[in-house]
Amino acid sequence: MGKYIFLDIDGTLYNHRENKIPESAIEAIDKAKEAGHMIFISTGRSICQLKQINHINYDGVITSAGAYVYVDHKVLFEETISNEELNDISEICGELNIAYCYEGISGVYLQKAAQDYFELNRESRALKKEEELQELFCFYNISEYTKGEKIFKLSLFSTSYSALIRLGEMLGKDYKVVVTTESKEKRVGNMCVAELTLSHIHKASGIKKILDYYNSAFEDAIAIGDSMNDAEMIEACKVGIAMGNADARLKEIANYVTADIGEDGLYKAFAKYGLLGK
């Protein structure tokens, strides 16, 4: 019986050090599809930010870390953060000197400090021109956000790790703040980056929506990721695989740690679990 394979994008499928998807990863996905398995993207990115994977043969997507699920040409699930809640969160972020961006269905709306982070990130990785990067990732100034557009999550930026933790404490049980750059070597410009979602929303909850749709279960699912926003799906699926370049905390809970993304890690993981067919 075919498996349901869930892949993170950044650091798992897309190699930012080389600004591309490894050819071996594309080959692995094609072979797995031919062998009868199904491929799903499971990412923290918004649905409008998938241009870099348009050439990948996948069956559906979980975006916004579980808040939006699209399969079989239809939306299976979506849950947004209300304008009133956004205002409250933004006010607290201001008090704690935390920059943020709203991640919506049509665009990602950044404060100036968040724009500065992405520009510094672009320069450090010799990425495309700023305007090309903005088009690729649907970046807009936060002044262009229009109330009523669906917003699924926020990304947060602060030089203070403790400020991000404090934000989670102040928001209470309805929200979750996941710091994705806890280790200093993963930071750009000493900036800690975090994701803010509704507490009951995560990649595993998105995976369950898809598995339910296909009358299947986590026993038939395999998840591969590299960041702490992958933790729930790594724990929930029958097989949870961490990339060699993954956060050390994720490696501790994974069933298997494959090679680095730049060393054909995805292909090797597929081979390890017999997903490539004959």
Image: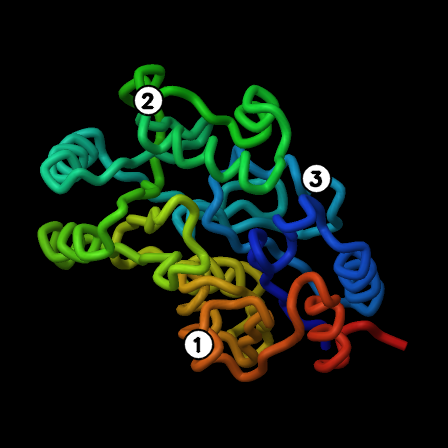
Number of the label disc, if any, that sits on residue 247: none
Up/down of 114 relative to 34, above or below: above
Where residue 266 appears, as percent x and y from the top left, is 69, 67
The amino acid type found where label 1 is placed reads Glu
The amino acid type found where label 2 is placed reads Ile
Query: Disc 2 marks which residue?
Result: 142
For the C terminus, give its image quadrant. Answer: bottom right
Compute the Cα span from label 2 to label 3: 26 Å
Q: Earlier in the sequence, mark 2 or mark 3?
A: 3
Query: Disc 3 marks which residue?
Result: 54
Where residue 271 appears, as percent x and y from the top left, is 77, 77
For the N terminus, give its image quadrant. Answer: bottom right
Colouring used for the render = rainbow
Circle nearer the viewer, 2 or 1: 2
Task: Tell me if label 1 and label 3 are in contact, CB under 8 Å.
Answer: no
Of the pair 195 and 207, the residue shown nearer to us:
195
Task: Tell me if label 2 and label 3 are in contact, CB under 8 Å.
Answer: no
Compute the Cα span from label 1 to label 3: 28 Å
Q: Residue at x 31, y 27 (%)?
A: 111
Of the pair 232 and 150, the residue shown nearer to us:
232
Q: Residue at x 36, y 28 (%)?
A: 110
Q: Earlier in the sequence, mark 1 or mark 3?
A: 3
